[in-house]
Each structure stands twice: as C-alpha cells, then as structure tokens.
Image (cartoon, rainbow, N blue to C red):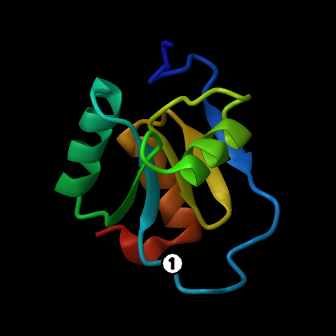
Amino acid sequence: MFVPCMNMSDGVTNESGSNGGEQIDAVDFYWRPGCPFSMMLEKKLVKQGIPLAKKNIWDDPSAAEFVRSVASGNETVPTISVGGRSMVNPSAGEVTSLLSEVAPHLVS
C-alpha cells in the first residue's frame, strides 16, 4: 500500500483542546522512513535549532491516527503539531512563522 509523504492540500488545522498553558518544549514532528520531504524539512528545522519530538507513524499507531485526523484521513508526512495547531507538509518558513505565534521561545 502506498502512503503519501506529501499532499497538495496543505494547511493549518486547529486541534480540539489546547496546550492548557503548558510550556511547549518541542515541535511534534510526524514522519516515516524513506520520505524525502520529511528528511528535507527535518534538516532545515534542525539547522535553525528548532527542537523536534519525532514520531514515526509506521512504528506508533497513535501517531498515525493523529496524522490521519489532521490530514483528511491520509497518512501524509511531514506533519507537525505545536500549541494545538497542526500543519501538513509545511515549509520550514511556515513552521517558523507558526512558532513565532504559539511558541516564540523555540525560534532562535
């Protein structure tokens, strides 16, 4: 079965609930082995010093379920989540922009 690692219908999704005012320590980074788009985004974010909490959707069923919940039922990666907001196949600039809103302390 083919699992896409990018989706042309990208966007920001607000998740139900919030982070409850808790300190955000890292960006939740959903990926799968062999996805070049995940590898490129990870490399750019790490280069910027942005901490990532990596979640392999092939090893973690709950991670795969989360991605499906924000990616129209697909297991599209890379997907990120931070501060109650998610993005499917974002650029590094889009992630940085989101971080400046919800977790500015993560942007160096």
Above/below status of 18 relative to 16: below
Q: Amino acid at mark 1?
A: Ile
Image quadrant for the C terminus? bottom left
Residue 64 falls in image quadrant? top right
Rendering coords of residue 70 (x, y %):
69, 41
Rendering coords of residue 101 (x, y %):
57, 65
Q: Residue at x 48, y 36 (%)?
A: 90
> On the rendered structure, is 59 left or right of 46?
right
Q: Nearer the viewer, residue 67 or 98?
A: 67
Give the crowd class for mark 1: few <14, some 14-19, many >=20 residues within 10 Å. Answer: some
Q: Nearer the viewer, residue 104 or 39?
A: 39
Rendering coords of residue 65 (x, y %):
65, 44
Q: Which residue is mark 1?
A: 24
Q: Residue at x 61, y 86 (%)?
A: 22
Q: Residue at the far left: name it.
A: 47
Above/below status of 86 relative to 74: below
Q: Residue at x 37, y 43 (%)?
A: 92
Q: Nearer the viewer, residue 79 or 32?
A: 32
Rendering coords of residue 45 (x, y %):
28, 51
Residue 11 falls in image quadrant? top right
> On the rendered structure, is 61 left or right of 77?
right
Count of residue discs: 1
Q: Secondary structure at mark 1?
A: loop
